[in-house]
Each structure stands twice: as structure tokens, then as C-alpha cells.
Amino acid sequence: MTFDVDKIRGQFPILNETIGKYPLVYLDNGATTQKPQVVIDAITTYYTSQNSNIHRGVHTLSQNATSAYEGARELIQKHINAEKSYECIFTKGTTDGINLVAHSIGKSIKKGDEIIISTLEHHSNIVPWQFLVKEKGAVLKIIPMNHEGELDMDVYDSLLTNKTKIVSVTQVSNALGTINPIKEMISKAHEVGALFLVDAAQSLQHFSVDVQSLDCDFMVFSGHKIFAPTGIGVLYGKESILNELPPYQGGGDMIKTVTFEETTYNELPHKFEAGTPNIVGGIGLGAAIKWLSELNLKEVQKYEDEVLSYATSEILKIEGVTLYGKAKEKSGVLSFLVDGLHPYDVGTLLNQQGVAVRTGHHCTQPIMDYYKIPGTIRASFSLYNTKADVDAFIKALNRAVNMLK
Amino acid sequence: MNLAEKEIEIIEDFAIYDDWMEKYEYIIELGKDLPKISDEFKVKENIIVGCQSQVWLHAEKVDGLIKYTADADAIIAKGIISLLIQVLSNETAETIIDAQLDFIKEIGLQEHLSPTRSNGLVAMVKKMKIYALALKNK
């Protein structure tokens, strides 16, 4: 089965939008992805004929909504190959998931306990751990990167000690596209008895992630980055570990019994899902996962590599372009600057020609500090982007550069 | 020319361009006319923090009127600031504080005033008004 990109594009209505008189060329998939019609339909269907609060009612609507929501959880379980569906906790997104883990693990963190992250991390995988440094006296250690944007594995080895409680690292860098050797890193962390959290926010739209094969203790991702609605995500955690963790938020649904003297907590997954969740988000995520799992992801990856390769070779033909992020293993992202030009100017002129990219620090200020730059221009590709999109982008970029120089 | 007349003049200047490219070329040119802030004022306190383009602003009161100088590290930001200073400089504090600045929308540059973090310009306009307020009774 070869990858038919036109067929895929036909399923995304927003790709027909125009910006002024220019067709939209959407290259900001690292920030958020567009939604296929089946996901949009699932949302509309939910509010038209299924809407009801879940887990609570005896009436039909409530039971149908609950089935749809829990059905989504099972689709997710299969997609990431989790052993149990209740190991998949619905969250508001990646940031929420990381905060949940940091907060709950934080309860048992003592002064001097060590946490390892890397220079490549998004602020969402830095700040929650910094809270623990401040509040508990934990020590934060950072795996350095090299000029290509690859993590230094030798230094990683030396950072791991018997005081390391958790390692939290991104699988794919949102700013540089670097794919980290996560499986190997997890195995090393386990040797010293540390837990490992994989930030998979940028992974699942490009390739499949098998949590059992990776043997990660936690994995987080966001719905809106894999063709699903905003406001929903998943925290995967190994059952034994989640059972040991104290709850994050208190409220309805995460309880078994409540009295003013004592309250007992519910089992997984509900222990970590307080209050009425983003039901339509969960159902939308299920629809997106179903849609994605029907594609041949190996073909998708091969196609995306071709598009990225083409974009890389084309952009290097432009004088004055510096590429950031040249790891041997890369995914979906082209980060660059043009000598002497401010990214804001280039981004603005690209937008005038219908090309949507992102400019700035991409919530990865440590990476920008490493290169001593204010930010980059980032074009991030997904499975509905084409070589024609690359051509339009390069044409628009050339025009912008000529105007600004 | 009063403030309203200055705005109209700018709107008329821009009306001759219907092509976005010519409009932006003009803005880029305007950036070169920006009354440059002197280096002594390019200090931390005068930085307007937008996510991307760094903008420095300085204000002084001369003969009862507020005068602005500024700089930015992005050319387009420089051009738009130049327009803002063209309109707001040499006015009284009260006029500046009350200014609506509709001309930005009229010339089709409202996206530069959208409240995204990438915009130093929203913060810029605010700061120009705050400086005016601070200098009002001096």
C-alpha cells in the first residue's frame, strides 16, 4: 500500500483555506495538527446525539457517552501497546501529564534526590521539575547537547547515580527535530533504579510508539498534536507505579467513598481523573487514533522523510541560510535562520504569502541560549504536506529574503 | 497637524498600495526613518518585552509635548513603530493616553496588534501611553 497523500489531503477541510489570495501552506504542525473530517464529525455527532455526563448516569445517553469515551481509551491502549487500558490516564495534554507526574512523585522526593532532563526539553518538561528543586531541594541535572542537537550519551551515563529518581526526556525535539535514543536511555535509567518519563508530544504524529517495547515508566502526549482536539492528552504509566502514586487533583470520580472524616480513592484510571473530563476531546482523540491506526505508519514515515529531505536540500540552496538541528536521526522539523534577518520579519512576510511557520524560541529557551540566537524560523511537516508545499515555502522564502535584504 | 490629521495622512499614504508586497516594502523603508533611540537609553528598563522582536522606547517631555525615540531588532517592527511615533510624538500626554490608533487597522496591519506573544507592538502602544501618563504632571 503506497501512501496516497492527495487522498489524505482530501480528508482535511482546512487545507482548502486561503490567506488573502494565497492558498494556505500549513507548516506549523509542531505547534498543532489539523483535523480530518472523521474527527470533526465525531465531535459534531457527540454534541448532536450523545452528549451526557459519563460514569454517572443510568440513562441511555450517559451510557452511550461513557462507552464512547472508554472505547477511546481502549483504542489508545492498543495504539501505544499498553498492557491495560487503565494505564492510560486522560489528561488535558502533555503539560498537564508532566505536571501530574512531577506533583505526585514530588510527594516522596527528598532533599538531594536527583532528576535528569536534557537541554532539548520544552519548557513544559523543565518547569514542573524546577518546582521540585525549589520546594523539595531536589537536584536537577541536565544532559548536554552537541552542535548538531544530539544528546551526549557519555555525559548521560555519568549523570545517573543511585540518587536519580526520575529521568524525563523528549523523544523528538520540537525545535530541532532530533530523535533521541530513548530505548537505550530507559534501560540505563532502570539500571540505577530510576524511573523514566518519555515526552512523546512530537512523536505519535510521525511514528508509532510501543510503551511495552520501550519499557518506559511514563509516557505523555497531546491529542491536538495527533489530529485530535485540543484540551485532551494521555499519560501512560505502568500499573504498579501508578498504583503507588498519590492522586493529583481531588474531586468527583476519583473517589470511592467520601466522609468528612476520611475519603478513599478510586482505582485506576479514575484515581487520576477528577471531575468531569473533556469528554468530547476523549472521543475525538479516539476517532483520531482510529484514523491514524488505519494508515500504514511505516509508509507515512518514509513519505515524511522524503518531504523533509527535499525541503532540507532546497532550503540550503538559499544564500545565508543556517540550519539548526542536524542530528543523524531527525523528524519532521526544519529550523533555520537567514543571516542578518530577524525571524519575526521573515515569518511575517511568509504569512503574507499564505505560508504558516513558527518563529521564536519555540518554548525551548535553553536551546536558543546554546546557539546564542533569539529564536529560529521553524517549518514543521506532517503527513498531509507535499513537495508542492515545500516549493511554495521556498518561493515565498526567497521573496521575503529579497525584500528584507 | 493634529493627531487625527496625522492618522488620515498615513491612511492616504497607504491607500496607494493595494499589493501587500508594496505595503511591506514601504513599511521596511519607514523603519529607516525611525527616530533612533540613543544608546544610553538602550537599557533594560526601556526594553518592551514581547516574545520575539526586542523593542526599546524612550520618552521625554519638551515644551509640554511628549517626544518618543525607539529602536527594534526586527525591520517590520521598526517600520510600524516609526508610524506610531509619527502619530503620537509631539502631542500632549492626554491626547496620547486617549488615542485609539484606528489607522493601524485601516492600513491593514491589524495582525501586528493581535495579542499573541510574538507582538512587542501591543506592549509598545501600552508603554507609550504609560510613559505619557508618567510625564503628564512633570
Image (spheres, helix red, strand yellow):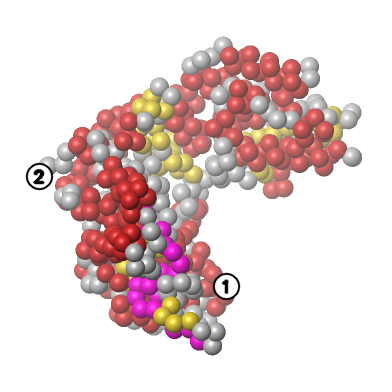
| Residue denoted by label 2 | A1
Q: Nearer the viewer, mark 1 or mark 2?
A: 2
Q: Position of residue A171 (x, y in %)?
A: 32, 60
The part of the chain drawn in magenta is A262-281
Out of A242 and B22, give the one closest to the viewer. A242
**How many marks can you see?**
2
Q: Give the chain letter at badge 2.
A: A
Q: Give the quadrant of residue B103.
A: top right
The answer to whether one can see residue A151 in this image is no
Instruction: Please tell me how crowded label 1 is: few (under 14), some (14-19), or many (20+) other residues with Cα within 10 Å.
Output: few
At x 57% / y 30%, what residue is drawn?
Answer: B110
Task: Identify residue for label 1.
Answer: A134
Front-lying residue, A106 or A151: A106
User: Where is residue A382 shown, x and y percent of the image?
Assistant: 29, 43
Examine the structure image and report whether residue B53 is included in the region drawn in magenta: no
> What residue is rendered at 56% in x and 37% in y?
B114
Circle 2 packing at 10 Å, graded few (<14), some (14-19), many (20+), is few
Residue A106, x across and y down, in percent: 48, 77
Q: Where B126 sits versus A260, above or below?
A: above
**Residue A190 image position (x, y, % from top left):** 30, 77
Residue at image point 82% right, 33% down: B94
State which quadrant residue A253 falls in.
Answer: bottom left
| Secondary structure under the numbered disc 2 in the rendered image | loop
Q: Amino acid at mark 2?
A: Met
The residue drawn where x is 49% and y is 32% is A348
